[in-house]
Amino acid sequence: MASDPLRLTFVQSATRTRDLPELGPEVSFVGRSNVGKSSLINALARQRQLARVSNTPGRTQLINVFSHSDGGAVVDLPGYGYAKVPGRVRKDWPEMIEGYLLDRETLVMVFVLVDGEIGPTPLDVQMLEWLRYNDVPHTVVATKSDKVKSSKRQRRKRDLAEGCMLETGDIVWVSAAKGDGIDRLRDLVRVHLAQ
């Protein structure tokens, strides 16, 4: 039986951590542009238009905060690595994202989204190394699991885990399109927001 959706409500967008509301424990989602962050947040909430989804990568250009009905918040961070975003916006992203990840005292878990079909890019590996170096708690979530052929799934899981320097069981595999793994990820989000 599917778990209940996360009851999320959009609260605010901001460019700086100091402008964000205090809602209790927070989990954030970060990943490369076009990895499916907004689609995944929508799947967790079982709402189509909660987080803005676009066919054009790089649409999430602000820190977007969603309150959870049982307390805490889910935060959608701008995607990294997309060159067509205006330079003036893109140059602010490292400070915006790193500032949030380092300075947000209520942040309890960062879900790092990696494209399950293509595996970790150099930017994904760089993000994971940065999080480890700064002791930021994080979990890798492999998106788009439905795009990996079943005959190649086990090898892809091993390769992706190795590329992220993790064990295979440490990675949460999901498909926002098919719903695979969404219940497990919902449960993880709830556990962290209950801290």
Image: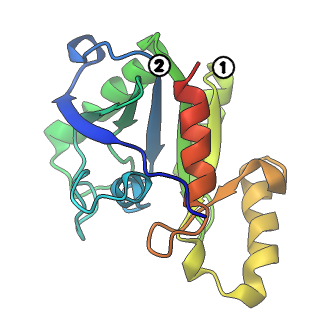
Q: Which mark is residue 112?
A: none
- In the rendering, at what x and y percent does residue 96 appear? 31, 26
Amino acid type, callout 2: Pro
* Nearest to N terminus: mark 2 or mark 1: 2
Q: Tag 2's secondary structure?
A: loop
Q: In this view, does 179 lie above or below 110?
A: below
For the point 28% across and 55% down, the residue is 83
Q: As drawn, is 99 to the left or to the right of 137?
A: left
**Badge 1: residue crowd in 10 Å (few <14, some 14–19, many ≥20):** few
Amino acid type, callout 1: Asp
**Nearest to viewer (mark 2 / mark 1):** 2
Pointer 2 with pointer 1, Cβ within 8 A: no
**Which of the image's four quarters has the C terminus?**
top right
For the point 25% across and 38% down, the residue is 9
- In the rendering, at what x and y percent does residue 62 appear? 22, 36
Q: Which mark is residue 135?
A: 1
Quarter of the figure with residue 148? bottom right
- In the rendering, at what x and y percent does residue 76 appear? 35, 40
Q: Is residue 65 above or below residue 79?
A: above
Is residue 69 in view from this perspective?
Answer: yes
For the point 25% across and 30% down, the residue is 92
**Badge 2: residue crowd in 10 Å (few <14, some 14–19, many ≥20):** many
Q: As drawn, is 54 to the left or to the right of 71?
A: left
For the point 25% across and 16% down, the residue is 21
Q: Name the residue under label 2.
A: 25
